[in-house]
Image (cartoon, rainbow, N blue to C red):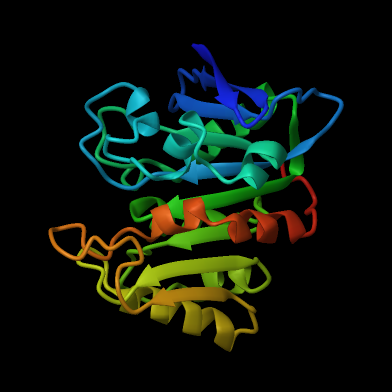
Amino acid sequence: AEAALHGRGQQSVATVLRDPNSFDSFVYRPAGSSASKKLPLIVFLHGAGKNERGIDNLTDLQGEYGGLLPSLIANNQAPQNVLENFVVLAPYSAGRRSFYDEPRSKILGCISHGISQIPQVDPSRVFLFGFSDGATLGVELLTSNRFGGGVICSYGFTGALPELAIQRLKSVPIWVFHSADDAIFAVQNSDQLVQCLRDRGNVVKYSRFSTDPEAFLVGPSRGHTTGITASRDPAVYEWLLSLPSTAPQP
């Protein structure tokens, strides 16, 4: 399934990548990109939801994941610097509440499959962008040493990370987003993560909001919107572009 995205003087292409061994994924690549020009890859991991629809649920501005990066890209509302400079791979957990209960090898296999099937991807510049359950899973995946950095929004793990995980994250660039009035995952989850990483020398970035930056001030999603905030922020993509390459992992 392939669709042309028009606007801002260019035409870009979004496709659906099928993987019978893991998950279907929404894929975006900039206009005019070719295998001869390697681009960094953002792997976007969504949070929990009903996920009863097809993969168009990811790209619907009025859907469960409206306002997050795949929907912004599909509707030509994403920051220009992500549209021009990145390939984006967004797996979709169709029929499952989220990725969190799936084997970690399965999601890593999905990512590896995407890298192998998208010739524009620079395998030394692969980044994670996770929201909610996707952020919690994202921190675990960052310990695999396969990624050059991560954007972690509304992190949900309430416990302390194991010592081995802390050691593996010590030198991984991470930017954390959370709101103090998050009604789903307490901001203390991110506070603990950030403090733990900083204590070990990781110069982690932390955008900690006192109130919901998207002004969802009532209802069950109050404060749980920093994935939208980060998706819309051009500074996030400038930061990712500034990160050094890493040695490709098998």
Can you name the residue that lies furthest to the bottom here?
Answer: 199
**Relative vertical location of residue 62 with respect to residue 44 in this rendering, above or below:** above
Q: Which residue is drawn at the image coordinates 34% and 53% (left, top)? A: 133
Can you name the residue that lies furthest to the left here?
Answer: 219
Residue 102 lies left or right of residue 37; in this view the side is: left
Q: Quadrant of residue 223?
A: bottom left
Q: Which residue is drawn at the image coordinates 27% and 39% (left, top)? A: 64
Residue 46: x and y, percent?
A: 39, 44
Residue 115: x and y, percent?
A: 66, 31
Q: Quadrant of residue 51?
A: top left
Q: Which residue is drawn at the image coordinates 53% and 59% (left, top)? A: 151
Q: Which residue is drawn at the image coordinates 52% and 51% (left, top)? A: 129
The answer to whether residue 70 is visible is yes
Q: Quadrant of residue 236?
A: bottom right
Residue 168: x and y, percent?
A: 61, 67
The answer to whether residue 143 is visible is no
**Relative vertical location of residue 187 with respect to residue 152 in this rendering, above or below:** below
Can you name the residue that lies furthest to the right here?
Answer: 36
Nearer-the-camera pick, 113 or 225: 225
> Quadrant where the C terminus lies?
top right
